[in-house]
Image (cartoon, grey):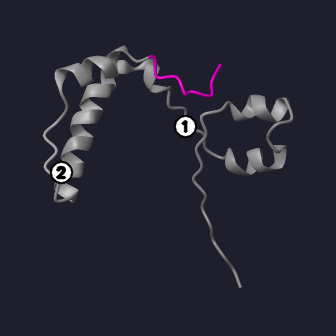
Amino acid sequence: MQVNVRVIAASNRDLEKEVREGRFRQDLYYRLAIIAIFIPPLREHKEDILPLVDFLSTVITSASASSVRGITDETRRLLLESDWRATYES
């Protein structure tokens, strides 16, 4: 039996560095790293936060019975002021 499989994987780690430091399997890395797309962390492009929130509000409203009407100005301010670092990062 022949199987054709495509795997899409994502990580918030620098996997090349993880391989060099022995924390990620080299053979697995080279199987996954056929095409790499780097997407910078949200903290590096905060101008995308509010349009993303607005888009997701629209998607959630149309996909469910809820009536999400957006977020408050205070919430918008907090989202923009966040440093967007994961709690496990140092």
Q: Are marks 2 and 1 in contact (CB under 8 Å)?
A: no
Pick the front one: 31 or 80: 80
Q: Is residue 85 left or right of residue 72?
A: right
The region drawn magenta spans 83-90
Q: Is 87 displayed left or right of 28 in the figure?
A: left
| Quarter placement of the C terminus | top right
Residue at image point 74% right, 32% down: 16
Crowding around mark 2 (Cα neighbors within 10 Å: few <14, some 14 to 19, many 20+) is some
Could you tell me which secondary element the residue under label 1 belongs to?
Answer: loop
Quadrant where the image shows the N terminus: bottom right
Q: Position of residue 10 (x, y in %)?
A: 58, 44
Q: Position of residue 68 (x, y in %)?
A: 16, 44
Which sits earlier in the primary sequence, circle 2 or circle 1?
1
10 Å crowding of disc 1: few (<14), some (14-19), many (20+): few
Instruction: Decide whether residue 61 is among the magenta residues.
Output: no
**Residue behind mark 1:** 37
Amino acid type at image mark 1: Ile
| Depth order, front residue of 87/54 | 87
How many angstroms separate mark 2 from mark 1 (CA)?
A: 30 Å
Quadrant of the rendered image containing residue 46: top left
For image coordinates 55% across by 32% down, the residue present is 38
Give residue 67's position: percent from left, percent from top.
13, 49
Residue 43 location (% of width, % of height): 45, 20
- Name the amino acid, label 2: Thr
Q: Is residue 15 left or right of residue 45?
A: right
Looking at the rendered image, the disc whose residue lies closer to the viewer, 2 or 1, is: 2
Q: Is 62 placed above or below 78 here? A: below
Which quadrant of the view contains residue 76? top left
